[in-house]
Amino acid sequence: MRAREFVTEGFSIKPSGKMRHDHKQAQKGVHLARDIGGYDRIYHMNRLMMAMAMADGRDRKPVKMDDCGWSEKYNTIHPYTEEEHNMLHQAMGVINTDYVPAFKDHRSSEPKDTYKTSPVKGFKGYAR
């Protein structure tokens, strides 16, 4: 027995690719959107939803927000040591990769405003 024979919702005689009348009737409005070129629809929808979360809905003026993040449509790779940095370049020598270095220096250090000691006094146990 085929699923079409016992599942009735979602299947219609109309050709696929068109929204059914009862689906249109149940919605206020539908918009189709993707990034220009359609390369990364998930990233595009994430940025679109971030902008919608910042909007107040009172007018149609654009919100004040960067249209893309610093890594945009690239995956990020974070080698910690010189050896891992070399391993990355060895791997990219084999696998064809569109590579853009985001930072020249790969050494890490704590920011100056990071606390070096805990503000909480350590618990040494209950008095006996």
Image (spheres, grey):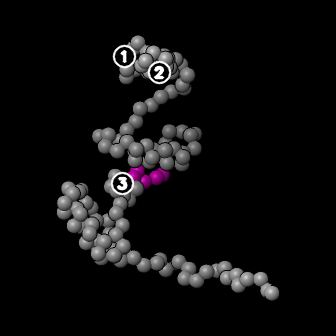
Q: Is residue 73 visible?
A: yes
Count of numbered labels shown in the rendering: 3
Q: Is residue 36 visible?
A: no
Look at label 1 and name its amino acid: Pro
Residue 67 % position (x, y): 40, 50
Say which residue appears at 57% left-offset and 44% top-offset.
Answer: 56
Q: CA distance from mark 2 to mark 1?
A: 12 Å
Q: Earlier in the sequence, mark 3 or mark 2?
A: 2
User: Quadrant of residue 32 in the image?
Assistant: top left
Residue 15 coordinates in the image, percent (x, y) = 36, 16
Tag 2, which secondary structure?
A: loop
* Magenta highlight on residue 57: no
Query: Label 1 belongs to which residue?
Result: 15
Residue 87 against residue 42 in the figure, above or below:
below
Closer to the camera in the image, 40 or 4:
4
- The vertical placement of 96 against 56, above or below, is below
Within-10-Å neighbours for mark 3: few <14, some 14–19, many 20+? few
Residue ID for mark 3:
72
Q: Secondary structure at mark 1?
A: loop
- Residue 10: mark in rendering: 2
Judged from this view, the residue extending furthest toward the right is 128
Horizontal relation, residue 4 to residue 89: left or right: right
